[in-house]
Each structure stands twice: as structure tokens, then as C-alpha cells.
Amino acid sequence: MIGHDSTQSARRVILLQRVTVWPTALLLAVGGGLLLTGLVLRSNAALRWGGAVLGLGGAWPSLALLFTGRLFARPKHQVLLLVAVGAQIVQLGHHLVAWGQTSRLDMALPHVTGVGSLFLHEWVGLFWLALVSAALLIARRSGCVGWMMTAACAWTVLHTLEHLYLLVQFARLTTAVDNFGLTRPNALNGSPGILGRDGWLAIHASSMRWWAGPLLAAPRVTVHLGWAVGDVALPIVASVRCGAWKRAQAAGDAPPHRGLAAATATMSESVSPG
Amino acid sequence: MVVSSDPLRTTECSGTFVEHRLRHMTRARTGDVLPFDTNGSGLAVGDLDGDGLPEIVLGDLRRSASVLWNHGRFTFERTALTDSAGGLDETNTRSVVIVDVDADGRNDIVTTHTGGGVSVWTNTGDRTFRSSSFDAVSTPAYSMLWDDFDGDGDLEFATGSYDALLEREQGNSFLLGSGAGVVVYEKVAGLYQPNRLIRAAQSLALVMFDTNGDGRRELVVGNDFGVPDAVYSRSQGGSWSAVEPFTRISRNTMAFAVGDVGNDGLLDLFATDMKPSSRDPETVAAWMPLLSTRFDRVLPGDSQQPENAFQRQTRPGQFSERAYATGIDATGWSWSAQFGDLDLDGHEDLYVVNGMIDHELLGHLRNDELAEPNVVFAAGRAGRFRRKPEWGLGSRASGRAMAMVDLDLDGRLDIVVNNLESPAVVFANKLCSPGAALEVDLRWPGRGNKQALGAVVVAKLDTGMLQRTVTATGGYLTGLDARVHFGIPAGRTVQELLVVWPDGHTSAVDSRGTGHLVTITRTAAP
């Protein structure tokens, strides 16, 4: 019976791999390729499609496991990590597109959309990050511990606080603009945040040290791309540190390439047996 | 060379500037302030009656310009700038400069106007003036600069047009005409010969400044409305050619200020632009029409950005734009700016006046006015400027032209501002400082350039050196006093004064100590 269970389990793993890991890897690769194409060819369409496909790649494992009924069969921290990383990859795709639109396509801020203009609303950014922060914090309490997980939580919470500051500033700005009877600006044209050019830290810095340059002088889209990279990278590394990757590797679920390994570590965690 | 020295006066201090309202208020021509009346009028400071105290000339748009005769102790007597021979008053004034145009030993007044004409108000010597139009000038002028371009001792000048104003005022007749632009007027056989460098300009500021470290100064043109600032280099033979020494410049240049901020013998250039001085949402909201209709199309990588620019000369002819890094990029809707050692600590401070009134653009604000406090910066040790609100210079009046000048000859630089729709003011410098001052007045008799415009004065201290350029124009539509001012830090002594005259001759003067006005008159054999 044990051997039969073991065979069934292996088949299940292969099946789940087929519907999660490989499509995810494909979507991430295609999305990344389209993004690169957009940057090289200065194509806004390629950029936006690239960001959208990359985001879909991030969300795919959660969605696939949800539809196959396997999502909540995993330990809680695995589920939360999977969802959190997926959500942050969606966000990273958006920020990559916004960064490409300003830096490579030379688009003025009113024309910058990222993946979609929905993401330009300050409240969306805050709500999104607040949920991810909560997921990471619960995942940490539920078993995925370690200093890297602590760093991932801290990073995302700080990013959330920056968005809270931005939302408050933007609310004040729109109130004042409404009082003047003027047209509201979009978030990118609103007030700066804590970090970056014209931000709170830059205004209050007594001197501009070389190491602080990017924190004090980078434009908003660059600052938030930096946040987004950390939002994705730190939880992935944290999940590796807390054993997901090692268990996936031991179960033979490890993707073939190290580059994909990092991006899909948490997804492997979810399809690993036991 | 003849050198004389007069002690500067001793006055009390209170630790701040004290505001004195003047009997002059620049008004727009219409009740609602419209473009480009909102650009206001200029001012000039300089000695018109030969008593050693600088007078103030304030332009106006609606009524006649004012001459404020300086009786000392910040008391002034106002007379209208009117033609003593029964001609018209000076009105609709833009740029104002005090120079000795006819080289008769008495300073005259030169003005530009909304319509682009240039007037000379010849000083008769009895506190009256006779007006004449400048026949040599046929191209519309807005900004103006007087100097000695080739160092031959002749007084020469340059003008820049503000085409947006001319289009609005003159419409098709301007568009179908021969244009305007930037013109230099050099004296050839005693007559001014125009040389148009470019046919179109939005020039609010002109300055002479050595941008390539070769010892010769270039003409720097500050343009509004995204027209790039232009720099023209003059060859030995007298031809002018465009050069591009700066990699990043302000987008809507309103004024220039030149100073040696690092006291390294290398002059730096500051340009004003429009950027909210505070990023709090209420301030940004007040700016929103401008931000959302003009500045939101500015690309992040554009070499022109809508903020002040500070071209720090790191090596001769090499510049690094450092406005944001040094904290002086945002000073509101800025107009005039000037460097000067206000607190006598040996470092040049920076004052910027600002404000905007515009019925069309700022109709959402009370009185159509964007009121922000003027900003003064003290040069800090780490290369970053520090705001000094405690100096009492944060006026919220709508400032346009501004000049630093020692009005009471006490060695401390006072400040004159010609506001729009508010009375003009003098800020009397009552800062308490352990430092001392040294002022230098150059005379070059027998030449057209009697004030030695373009000369460089170097004060050699026991530690380091300070450098100033003799100039009669600066900032926005502003005529400056040709006397130069040094702040000498406490405990330092001036060992020698070195003068590099416009023709390249040098004169060395032994120290007369601080606390003096030193007059250096160049004789035939320097």
C-alpha cells in the first residue's frame, strides 16, 4: 500500500507540475522576454503585454492550485508565501512597465500607465501591500521563520508605510485641488513620498551623502521599482531559507535551472508531497 | 594708480533684516494682472548724484518710474523719472541699468520697455534727466546687459527679446516682422554696431561669465518657455559663436546669479526657475494648473528641468549641476536671485525673490496670487545651503527685480526688491556678525567704461582668497551697483587686493585693512 501511495503521490506531483511549475516558468519567461523586447524596441505594447504576462506568471500557481483544489491542502505558511510572492510579481510587472515607459520610452508622467491605470490609484497600492504584508506576517507566525523572513516582512511593511504616507498626502492634495475647483492629478503627478526625489527624506536631509543618493534623488518610478524588486526577492529567498527549496529539491520537484529555481521555489513548495 | 580709502560707518545690529517700505509700487496696466504684466518691472541701484550713497531707480508698468534719492539712514526722497525738457515720463519699464553711457563722469539710466524700445536718461547733474531713445537699437529689447566685451575700455551692451510678450502685444505685426532675438552692440569708430546672434529668444536674463576657463567671458542668455539657454563665445577677432558648456539647465530661466561659492577662484552660475518651494500638498495644489498644463510634459531625462540650476564650476571650464544636491533647486516661482555675503562670514549667501500674480493661470487663488516666502540661503560647510528664515527676508510680496547693495555704507549688504502690486521694499541688513567688510570701487577715467565693468577684484587673505567681478547688471531686469563687496571672516586679514582690469592689466594694492571702502583709480600707467 505504501508503494501504491507513493506512486500515486509521484503521479500527482507530476500532474501538478504540469499545471503549475511549467506554465509558470513559461509565462515568466515569455513575460520577461516581452519586457526586454519592449525595452529594446521601445514598444509600449510589448512592455505592457510583458508586464501583464509576467504578472500572470506570478499569479498562475495560486490560481492553478486554487482551481485544482490543492491550494489549501498545503501548510498555511506555504499558501501565504505562494500568494504573497505571486501578488508581488504582479506588482513587479507593473513597476517594470512604468519604469520602462519613463526611462526607455521617454513618456511623460501623465501618459505612464504601467500595466494598467488601475494600479495608479494610491489606494490600490496601499491595499495591495497591506494584504501582502499581512500574508507575510501570518506566514512568519505559521512556521516560515528566520532572519530573511523577518527582513522580507520588514521590507514589505516599510513599503506599505510609504504607500500609506503617499495615500495621506494624495488625499490632502486632492482635497486642496477640489477646494480650488481644479482637475485632479493622477498619483504619479501627486506629492512625492518619503523616499526619492523631493521626498520627505530628501527635504529633511542635512546633507546629501553619496550612498544616500538614490534614496534622495531617484524619481518615484525608480524608487518603487526598487521596492518591488525587494518585495519579490526577499520572500523567495526567505522561503528557500525556511526550507521550501530544499524539500522541493529532495522530492525531485526542483526546476531544471537555478535561475528558475529562485522564482519558482515557493511554487515547488506547494506541489511537494507530504 | 591712485588709491584712496574711506572708513565704512558703524551701525547697530539686531540679528535680522529690517523691512522699510519705499514710496513706490509697481502696478500692472490693467486691474486684473495679465500675462505678461505679471513679469513686473526692474530696478537699478547706483550713485546718481556723486555723494557716494547709491540711489534706487524703480520701474513701473502703469505709472512713471521712480528715482529714490538716498539721504542716508534709509531715508529716500522720491522723484518721478521724467524728462526735464518736457518730454514723457519713463513708464512701461522692464529692465533698468545705471551706467555712465556718455562717459561724462555722471551715471545715467538706461531702460527697456514692454514694446521693446530702449531709452537713455542722461544725467544732467542737477538731479534731473533728459530722455532720448537709443538710435543704435532697432531690435526689440527686454533684458539688457552692459559690459566691456573686448576689454578695450569702451562701454558696450547686449539686449535680449522676450518674444512671447511681443507676440501677445503686437500679434501679426511682430510675427511678420523682422523678428527680435539677442543682439550685441559693440563700439566701432565711436558708434554702436549691432550684431544679432539669434533671431528669436525668450530672454529674461543676460550675464557675462567665463564658461570655458580661458579667461574670456561668454555671454549667457537665459530663456523662458523651454527655449534652451544659450551661450555665445566671442573670439579675439570679434565674431560670436554658440557653445554648450552645460549638460543640464533650468527649463524656464528667469534670472542668473554669479558667485564664487566655494571660494576657489572659480565662478559658479545659479539660474532661477519655477518649482514649489515646499512639497506639502496644499502648496502643490496651488501650483496645479502650471504643473498639470506645462510641466507634466517634461520628460524625466530632459536636459532642461523646471527647477533652479546651479552650475558649480569644479575645474576651469567644467561644470556640475548641483542645485538639487545642494538644496537650492526649489525656491517657488522665482525671479531675481543674487549672491552676496550677507553675514560677513567669507561665504556668499544666496537670496531669491518669488511670487506670481496671473488672472488667467491663477484665478483659483485669492487675488490671483501665488504667495510664497522669499528664500535666503547661507552657504553651508558641507556644500549644501541652509535656509535662514530667522534673517527676516521671507517676504510674501510678489518680488521681481532685486539687488544687494550697501545703501548706508556700513559694510553690510542691504537688499532692494521691486515687488508687483505691493510696495517696493528695502531690507536693511542688521545682522550681527563678528566679521568685517571691505568694499572696492574701481574707476577707469579716460575710458568709456569708467566703472571698469568686467574687471575682477581678488582679495588675498592670510588663508585663501575671495573673488568678485565688477558688473552693472544681474538677476532679473536688475541693475547692480558696480562696487564690489567682500565679507571678511573674523580673525582673517586682507593681505593684498589684486585687480585684473577689463583689458587684462593687473594692479596690486596693499591691504588697507577691513572696514573700508577702497577706491582704486587707474591712471595712464597702471
Image: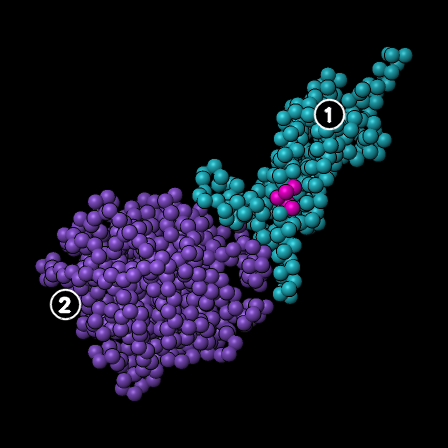
Chain colours: A cyan, B purple
Residue A162 within the magenta-colored segment of the rendering: yes
**Disc 1 is attached to a residue of which chain?**
A
Please determine whether, in this image, residue A141 is positioned above or below residue B181: above
As drawn, is A74 to the left or to the right of A214? right
Q: Looking at the picture, does residue B203 appear above or below residue A210?
A: below
Count neighbours of disc 1 (C-alpha within 10 A) and say few if under 14, some if 14 to 19, many if 20 or more: few
Query: Looking at the image, which residue sits at the far right?
Result: A1
Is label 1 or label 2 in front?
1
Q: Seen in the image, is B139 located left or right of residue B467?
A: right
Above or below B502: residue A142 = above
Dot 2 falls on which chain? Answer: B
Residue that mark 2 sits on? B446
Q: Residue at x 25, y 77 (%)?
A: B122
The crowd level at tag 2 (other Cα within 10 Å; few <14, some 14-19, many 20+) is some
Q: Is residue B270 above or below residue B179?
A: above
- The residue shown at (37%, 76%) is B23
The secondary element bearing badge 1 is classed as: loop
- Labels in figure, total: 2
Q: Tell me the number on the disc at residue A143.
A: 1
Left/right of residue A169 with respect to residue A142 in the rendered view: left
Residue that lies at the very extreme toward the bottom in this rendered image: B86
Query: Could you say where residue B424 lies in the image, as x and y percent from the top left?
Result: 39, 71
Find residue A144 and report its horizontal and vertical position in percent: 71, 26
The answer to whether any part of residue A267 appears in the image is no
Q: Is residue B346 located in the magenta-colored stretch of the structure?
A: no
Residue type at the position of mark 2: Gly
* Res. B280 image quadrant: bottom right
**Residue B431 found in image quarter:** bottom left
Please state the extent of the stretch shown in magenta in the rendering.
A160-164
Q: Main secondary structure of the magenta part?
A: helix
